[in-house]
Amino acid sequence: MDPRFHHGADLFNRGEFFDAHEVWEDVWREAPPEHKKFLQGLIQIAVALHHYSRGNVVGARSLLARADINLALYPATYLGIGNDDVRKQLAAARNAIEHGRQCGFCIQVAGMDKN
């Protein structure tokens, strides 16, 4: 996988959601078609959490819902990421946001195999 993919995950896990989205978009543009919806889902989560951090709760909710639809198309682990874990965290984040609870850095992209 493109090293920028891992760099984007590192940025995401540090809470640098806007920068992660920018890096992942570059990867997405060059990715083979079979990876595009998965990458789009990760990008949507990054943008959603960026929106949330800026007070745009409606935008965050909408993007998190669309991200879940995209990620649901892929297996439990994909491109070295624990997709099932990400989707569980995504569901918890959506629930927190829906009920007015703090989300913050509530999603981490884990299980990365950098080889």
Image (spheres, rainbow, N blue to C red):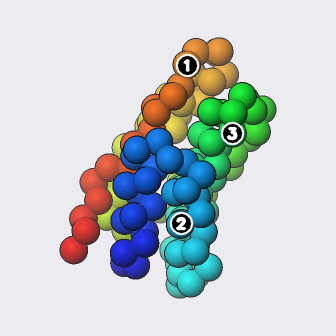
Instruction: Specify the label residue 102 is tagged with.
Output: 1
Looking at the rendered structure, the kind of residue marked 2 is Trp
Q: Position of residue 76 (x, y in %)?
A: 36, 55
Give whichever of discs 3 and 2 has the lower sequence position.
Answer: 2
Point out the image quarter for the C terminus.
Answer: bottom left
Give whichever of discs 1 and 2 has the lower sequence position.
Answer: 2
Mark 3 = which residue? 51
- Outermost residue toward the top? 100
**Point 75% across, 32% down: residue:** 56
Give whichever of discs 1 and 3 has the lower sequence position.
Answer: 3
Can residue 52 be seen from the camera position used here?
yes
Question: Marks 2 and 1: in contact by CB < 8 Å?
Answer: no
Mark 2 = which residue? 24
How far apart are the alpha carbons under marks 1 and 3? 14 Å
How far apart are the alpha carbons under marks 1 and 2? 25 Å
Q: Is residue 101 above or below residue 31?
A: above
**Point 40% across, 46% down: residue:** 13
Q: Position of residue 31 (x, y in %)?
A: 53, 81
